[in-house]
Amino acid sequence: MSRTPRMNADEVKNILQRYGFKLVSQKGSHRKWRNIERQLQSNCAVS
């Protein structure tokens, strides 16, 4: 099984926005993204 490619913060942001996620909050290096239509949430650590 191959590894998942490493992505930087801008790549993750672009992918999440493409799927309808909006940034709702940030605390330190962690960003919280939410998609209201599908009622999904994602937390991403940013370095």
Image (spheres, grey):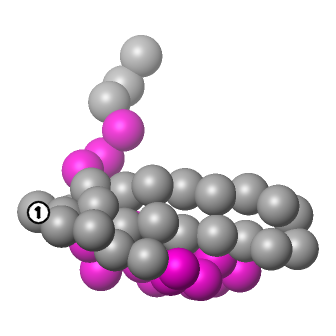
Q: Position of residue 3 (x, y in %)?
A: 32, 30
Label 1 Cα neighbours within 10 Å, binned few <14 / some 14-19 / many ≥20: few
Would you say 22 lies left or right of 10 here?
right
- Measured as percent of width and height from the top left, residue 10 is found at 30, 80
Q: Quadrant of the C terminus?
A: bottom left
Q: Residue furthest right?
A: 37
**What residue is shown at x 19% (from left), y 64% (from top)?**
29
Image location (x, y in percent) of residue 22: 59, 83
Magenta range: 4-24
Q: Which residue is mark 1?
A: 47
Based on the displayed image, in which of its 4 quarters is residue 41 positioned?
bottom right
For residue 7, above or below residue 37: above
Q: Residue at x 53, y 80 (%)?
A: 24
Residue shown at 88%/74% (left/top)? 37
Q: Is residue 42 above or below residue 13?
A: above
Q: Is residue 10 magenta?
A: yes
Q: Is residue 5 magenta?
A: yes
Residue closest to the far left: 47
Location of the N terminus by quadrant is: top left
Horizontal placement of 24 versus 5: left or right?
Answer: right
Residue drawn 73% across the image and 57% down it: 40
Residue 13, x across and y down, in percent: 42, 77
Say whether residue 4 is visible.
yes
Amino acid found under the numbered disc labelled 1: Ser
Q: Quadrant of residue 25?
A: bottom left
Give the vertical position of 15 relative to 40 (above or below).
Answer: below
Q: Is residue 8 left or right of residue 3?
A: left
